[in-house]
């Protein structure tokens, strides 16, 4: 099995191109189920999760072709769901990736029935799907659980309805807003997630002829239409990838421009880095990150839904704060089991104590390289960030987690001076 070998201690300098966002591309691909016309997505990242969702969509009857370049903004995906041949997303396919569950809403909206396996995905807590289900029930879907499957039916089609999400959920907001676009009449959704990926999905639905008001606010008014058209739409830059590289530069010290990154999507990270004496500024091409040799300060941070600090950057932040001057506290408010990287960072000499949802990080002068085990996508890249700054060799095992969400990771980092390679066991 592949692993990644890092010899830490090199400062990073140069530029890193930021890829299209995985978490934006996945729901945009799912939106292809809403129409029989072609949907073309540009700036599609080349990632295992994208290929996995493409397989599930093909299984449902979507024709999918990749066009253009092998990576970067010129990589296009053309999707066409002319007829939905199967309205079932089976366990074997869905278990590998939670986002594949998001097909439930569009399927029941267009095919009036769906059978979707309960999801798997990263092992970061129980991650229920009750909000997806309650939201679709508010649009008139009848939903039952049957042997690990969610079975949804709306014989006469979905009807507009009113639903207030009791907590902010990215996936449930996406699933229900897509379904409402094809429902009969008006839907009002309250407490909708504000993540840029959710906003962009709503913009795609509008580009397809959907009628949505309130994009960028917590309340959406969606006037259902009987048919949506095709569209061409660009996947936004990956704020989590950009934030991860920002944290790598902040941890090793260095000077890097994140080309293509959008500053406005990462203001919460910018605030944290500036509080730690790291420069994080918008440029006309992206974001400039700079830290001189001096040791950075510790800080207290809580993860929160957007525009708060993203949970998907929490592991990378912890790797950064492990060598800060002073004590930091990190509160994880989104997922109840998202500290699995802590024992691995401890193997590298980090001093971290966890009480409930709060990790107390006492900064040490330097981490030491060690063999470590990736447990989920973001945790594993947190270990890479730690390894880049650690003394000696770090070996990150279970690299398949990284391949789900980071395109050309070793290449992008080594071009900036990191000593990082992929090797076969
Ligand atoms: C998405 C992101 C993921 C990110 C997360 C939070 C994608 C493909 N994935 O995941 O990278 O970490 O947002 O920013 O975009 N919840 C329920 N019931 C539900 C749904 C969610 O209780 O039906 C809870 C979850 O357990 C969690 C919280 O709501 O505690 C937020 O989860 P949610 O925003 O739904 O995350 P995902 O959409 O799965």
Image (spheres, rainbow, N blue to C red):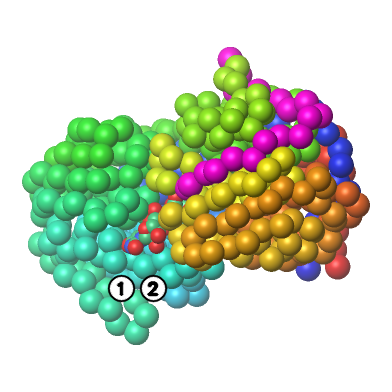
Q: Quadrant of the N terminus?
A: bottom right
**Residues marked 1 and 2 touching at CB (< 8 Å):** yes
Q: Is residue 164 visible?
A: yes
In this view, the residue farthest toward the bottom is: 147
Q: Is residue 290 magenta?
A: yes
Please report the residue visible at 14 percent of the width from the left and 46 percent of the height from the top.
187
Q: Which residue is mark 1?
A: 150
What percent of the width, then of the height, locates residue 59? 44, 65
Local SS, label 2? strand
414 left or right of 200 in image: right
Please report the residue visible at 20 percent of the width from the left and 45 percent of the height from the top.
190
What percent of the width, then of the height, locates residue 33? 34, 52
Q: Quadrant of the C terminus?
A: bottom right
Ligand 1 position by quadrant: bottom left
Q: Is residue 135 magenta?
A: no
Q: Which residue is mark 2?
A: 117
Q: Is residue 82 visible?
A: no
Is 224 in front, or is 12? 12
State which region is magenta: 284-303
């Amino acid at each position: 099995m592949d692993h990644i070998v890092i010899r830490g201690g090199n400062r990073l300098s140069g530029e890193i191109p930021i890829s299209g966002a995985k978490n934006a591309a996945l729901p945009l691909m799912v939106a292809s189920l809403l129409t029989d016309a072609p949907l073309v997505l540009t700036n599609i990242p080349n990632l295992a999760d994208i290929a996995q969702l493409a397989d599930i969509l093909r299984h449902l009857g979507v024709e999918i072709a990749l066009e253009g370049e092998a990576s970067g903004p010129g990589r296009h995906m053309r999707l066409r769901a002319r007829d939905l041949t199967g309205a079932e997303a089976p366990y074997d396919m869905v278990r590998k990736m939670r986002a594949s569950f998001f097909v439930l809403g569009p399927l029941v909206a267009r095919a009036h029935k769906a059978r979707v396996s309960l999801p798997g995905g990263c092992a970061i807590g129980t991650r229920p799907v009750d909000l997806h289900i309650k939201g679709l029930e508010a649009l008139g879907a009848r939903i039952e659980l049957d042997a690990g499957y969610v079975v949804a039916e709306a014989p006469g089609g979905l009807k507009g309805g009113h639903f207030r999400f009791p907590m902010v959920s990215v996936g449930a907001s996406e699933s229900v807003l897509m379904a409402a676009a094809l429902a009969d009449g008006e839907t009002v959704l309250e407490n909708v997630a504000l993540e840029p990926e959710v906003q962009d999905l709503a913009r795609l639905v509008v580009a397809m002829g959907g009628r949505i008001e309130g994009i960028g606010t917590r309340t959406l008014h969606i006037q259902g239409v009987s048919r949506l058209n095709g569209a061409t739409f660009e996947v936004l830059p990956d704020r989590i990838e950009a934030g991860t590289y920002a944290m790598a530069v902040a941890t090793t010290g260095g000077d890097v421009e994140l080309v293509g990154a959008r500053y406005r999507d990462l203001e919460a990270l910018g605030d944290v880095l500036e509080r730690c004496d790291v420069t994080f500024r918008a440029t006309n091409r992206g974001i400039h990150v700079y830290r001189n040799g001096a040791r950075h300060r510790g800080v207290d941070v809580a993860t929160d839904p957007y525009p708060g600090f993203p949970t998907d950057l929490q592991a990378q932040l912890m790797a950064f704060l492990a060598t800060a001057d002073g004590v930091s506290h990190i509160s994880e408010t989104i997922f109840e089991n998202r500290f699995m990287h802590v024992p691995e960072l401890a193997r590298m000499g980090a001093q971290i104590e966890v009480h409930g949802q709060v990790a107390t990080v006492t900064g040490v002068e330097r981490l030491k390289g060690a063999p470590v085990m990736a447990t989920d996508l973001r945790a594993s890249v947190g270990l890479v960030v730690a390894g880049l700054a650690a003394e000696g060799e770090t070996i990150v095992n279970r690299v398949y987690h990284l391949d789900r969400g980071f395109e050309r990771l070793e290449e992008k980092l080594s071009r900036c001076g990191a000593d990082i390679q992929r090797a076969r066991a």
